Image: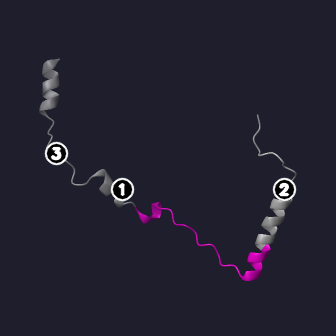
Amino acid sequence: MRSEFESIVEGLSLDESSPTTFLDDLDRLDNAERFIAPIPPRQNLRSTFMSAKKAFARWFNRGDHDDDGAHV
């Protein structure tokens, strides 16, 4: 058993290092694999106001919730 272990270890060399590291490989990721944030379309003043009005109406008409939402 010891001779088998020595023959395996004999074939290994600690001087064999790769020319790149894991961090180098991470830096080289394709741009296709990265997230590109979408650019939302610009809104004019009227559509911004209407959107805010709808959001406020949804919030105001959400129902009668006097509690904090925690349930036991």
Residue type pointed to by label 2: Arg
Q: Secondary structure at mark 3?
A: loop
Rendering coords of residue 4 (x, y %): 16, 22
> Residue at label 2?
62
Residue 47 drawn above or below residue 29: below
Q: Secondary structure at mark 2?
A: loop
- How many other residues sit within 10 Å of disc 2, few (<14), some (14-19) or many (≥20)? few
Q: Nearer the viewer, residue 42 or 71?
A: 71
> Residue at label 1?
26
- How many other residues sit within 10 Å of disc 1, few (<14), some (14-19) or many (≥20)? few
Which label is found at residue 16? 3
Residue type pointed to by label 1: Leu
Which label is found at residue 1? none
- How many other residues sit within 10 Å of disc 3, few (<14), some (14-19) or many (≥20)? few
Q: Residue 68 colored magenta?
A: no
Segment tinted magenta in the rendering = 30-50
Mark 1 vs mark 2, CA separation in Å: 46 Å
